[in-house]
Image (cartoon, grey):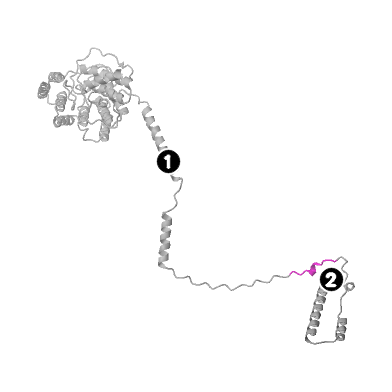
């Protein structure tokens, strides 16, 4: 390899020398005139390399790695780094503009396109849960009724006809949110549950009240308990009650006949002989409520509570009288606390049912009306309010049965509800 390179270098060098001579000869000819004889010797003196004189390169050449010298790359020249220039002074206006631009960019971010989808799915989910909850509440089975007053042993005395008296009330406004059932005369909705039973035959459509019923004569034998057809309510035995004052009994009879003046006189005569006669006081309070004298009636009930703070009838009557001035939830809580102390008071079950009916909670009201009627199956008002609650719960068969039972009881015992409205409803449900 080295020989070949050397031969090539020599050939290149010879070629360059020939070119120089040619340029020299032409330059000399241009500058001065020479004789042909002078030029000939120089031409003869020029040595010309011929082919035979070239080195023999037919032999194989050996490549020696030592001949190849790796040339180290030249170190790059590092240009001097420019000196850092001082930053230009910030313009306050440009800084304010930049800050304002950042604030607007933060406020006006591009909304997430999936947000409406999530909102729609959430609303549909809540609606579905509400629908399921509504149907579950409407279709759930009512609670089992419990007879709060089991039959007592025969011959056991009761307190002054307490089981036969009911609490006075002032009718409250009908609960809102209940669907009307047309067809009743003078009303576009179901018959309102009567607040309490009144003893007079000339019942007032606006204010009603119950009066104590004279205790019936003791029965020689009590019939066994019987079941009402198609009803889970157990009617307890009729039990004997002690005799009452004759004037109280005559006053109650006059009250049933609609002679309020005679009834008041008889009750007052009984109080002259027995100032603390509870039945006479309850009768006077009932007459006061019937005639619209609510303050004297309330005073009588407070007098009864002073004598016996646990008098359930007086408590129930005061709650009914103050229904328009009390919070329904507070009244409900008060009645429940009274029931905890006296679970055998049927009038408290009736009062609690009235408070629940005022709130439109008919399923719960129906349970307490059933308990009250089970404790006093001869009370027409208890049967009527139970029928109204069943009517609101869309149970026409049972409602018809208790409407008819209430009308039958009202013929024997004074009732507070409107007989014409009850008869009209019976005709509608019977068709």
Q: What residue does disc 2 label?
A: 3
Residue under the point 46% across and 45% down? 114
Closer to the camera in the image, 120 or 294:
120
Say whether residue 73 is visible. yes
The mark nearer the N terminus, 1 or 2, is: 2
Label annotation for residue 329? none
Residue 133: % across, % down:
39, 33
- Residue 345: percent from the left, percent from the top? 25, 25
Q: Which residues are magenta?
A: 61-70
Residue 138 percent across, percent down from the top left: 36, 28
- Residue at which label 1 appears: 120
CA separation, marks 1 and 2?
Answer: 92 Å
Above or below, 243 against 1 in this view is above
Residue 130: quadrant of the picture: top left
- The answer to whether residue 66 is magenta is yes
* Res. 152 visible in picture: no
């Amino acid at each position: 390899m080295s020989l070949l390179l050397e031969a090539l270098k020599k050939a290149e060098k010879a070629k360059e020398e020939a070119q120089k001579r040619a340029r020299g000869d032409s330059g000399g000819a241009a500058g001065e005139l020479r004789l042909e004889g002078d030029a000939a010797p120089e031409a003869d003196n020029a040595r010309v390399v011929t082919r035979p004189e070239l080195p023999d390169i037919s032999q194989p050449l050996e490549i020696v790695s030592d001949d190849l010298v790796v040339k180290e790359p030249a170190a790059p020249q590092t240009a001097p780094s420019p000196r850092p220039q001082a930053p230009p002074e910030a313009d306050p206006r440009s800084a304010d503009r930049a800050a304002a631009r950042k604030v607007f960019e933060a406020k006006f971010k591009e909304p997430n396109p999936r947000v409406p989808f999530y909102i729609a799915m959430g609303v549909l989910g809540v609606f579905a849960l509400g629908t399921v909850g509504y149907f579950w509440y409407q279709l759930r089975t009512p609670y089992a009724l419990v007879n709060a007053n089991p039959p007592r042993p025969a011959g056991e005395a009761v307190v002054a006809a307490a089981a036969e008296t009911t609490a006075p009330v002032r009718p409250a406004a009908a609960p809102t949110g209940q669907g009307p059932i047309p067809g009743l005369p003078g009303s576009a909705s179901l018959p309102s549950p009567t607040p309490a039973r009144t003893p007079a035959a000339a019942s007032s459509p606006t204010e009603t009240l119950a009066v104590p019923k004279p205790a019936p004569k003791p029965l020689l034998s009590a019939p066994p308990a019987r079941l009402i057809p198609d009803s889970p309510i157990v009617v307890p035995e009729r039990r004997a009650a002690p005799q009452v004052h004759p004037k109280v009994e005559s006053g109650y009879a006059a009250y049933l006949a609609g002679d309020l003046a005679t009834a008041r006189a008889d009750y007052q005569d009984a109080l002259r002989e027995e100032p603390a006669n509870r039945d006479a006081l309850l009768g006077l309070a009932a007459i006061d409520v019937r005639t619209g004298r609510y303050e004297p009636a309330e005073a009588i009930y407070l007098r009864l509570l002073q004598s016996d703070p646990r008098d359930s009838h007086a408590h129930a009557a005061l709650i009914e009288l103050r229904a328009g001035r009390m919070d329904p939830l507070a009244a409900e809580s008060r009645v429940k606390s009274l029931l905890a102390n006296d679970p055998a008071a049927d009038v408290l079950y009736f009062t609690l049912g009235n408070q629940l009916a005022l709130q439109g909670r008919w399923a719960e009201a129906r349970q307490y009306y059933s308990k009250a009627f089970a404790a006093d199956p001869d009370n027409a008002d208890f049967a009527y309010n139970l029928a109204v609650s069943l009517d609101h719960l869309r149970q026409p068969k049972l409602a018809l049965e208790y409407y008819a039972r209430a009308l039958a009881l009202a013929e024997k015992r004074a009732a507070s509800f409107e007989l014409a409205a009850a008869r009209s409803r019976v005709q509608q449900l019977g068709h």
